Image (cartoon, rainbow, N blue to C red):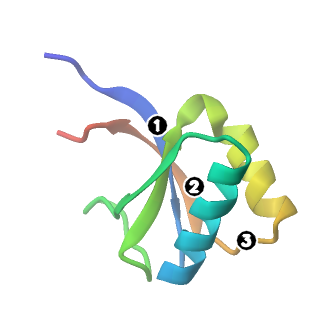
Amino acid sequence: MSSGIECGVVLFESTSAALKAEKEAVKTGLKVKLIPVPRALNSGCGFCLRFDWQDIEKIRGLLISRELKFEGIHKLKWPPN
């Protein structure tokens, strides 16, 4: 059985922040998806933005340059066990 792929998730304080980040990431051509926050992580918002871990610097740069507020970025395996 496959152990999954390495991906990252960005946690946000609000759903509107998560939606805005998704919109901005898609506009720049990044492959992202809004997913429910994994149980192992806590967030003020019920959604997080999943992305390929190889795009971590692009995602971080996008969040900072667009002044998108986020709680944190975490690395994990997808799909989770």
First reached walking from the N terminus: tag 1 or tag 2: 1
Residue 65: give x, y in percent of width and height. 86, 60
Amino acid bearing label 1: Cys
In front of the other: label 2 or label 3? 3
- Residue at x 69% of width, y 48% of height: 59
54, above or below 64, in the image: above
Residue 30: give x, y in percent of width and height. 63, 41
Instruction: Tell me which corner region of the image, top left, top right, bottom left or bottom right, holds residue 17.
Output: bottom right
Which residue is labeled 2 in the image?
73
Question: Relative to 3, is 68 on the left or the right?
Answer: right
Residue 6: give x, y in percent of width and height. 43, 30
Residue 43: give x, y in percent of width and height. 43, 75
- C-alpha distance separating marks 1 and 2: 10 Å
Amino acid bearing label 2: Ile
Residue 7 disc label: 1
Image quarter hosting the N terminus: top left
Residue lying furthest left: 1
First reached walking from the N terminus: tag 2 or tag 3: 3
Of residues 39 and 51, the one drawn nearer to the viewer in this rendering: 51
Q: What element carries label 2?
A: strand
Q: How many marks?
A: 3
Image quarter hosting the C terminus: top left
- C-alpha distance separating marks 3 and 1: 20 Å
- Residue at x 73% of width, y 71% of height: 68
Which residue is labeled 3 in the image?
68
Amino acid bearing label 3: Leu
46, above or below 63, in the image: below
Classify 10 Å Cα crowding around label 1: few (below 14), some (14-19), many (20 and above).
Answer: some
Residue lying furthest right: 65
Of residues 76 and 21, the one drawn nearer to the viewer in this rendering: 21
52, above or below 43, in the image: above
Question: Relative to 44, is 68 on the left or the right?
Answer: right
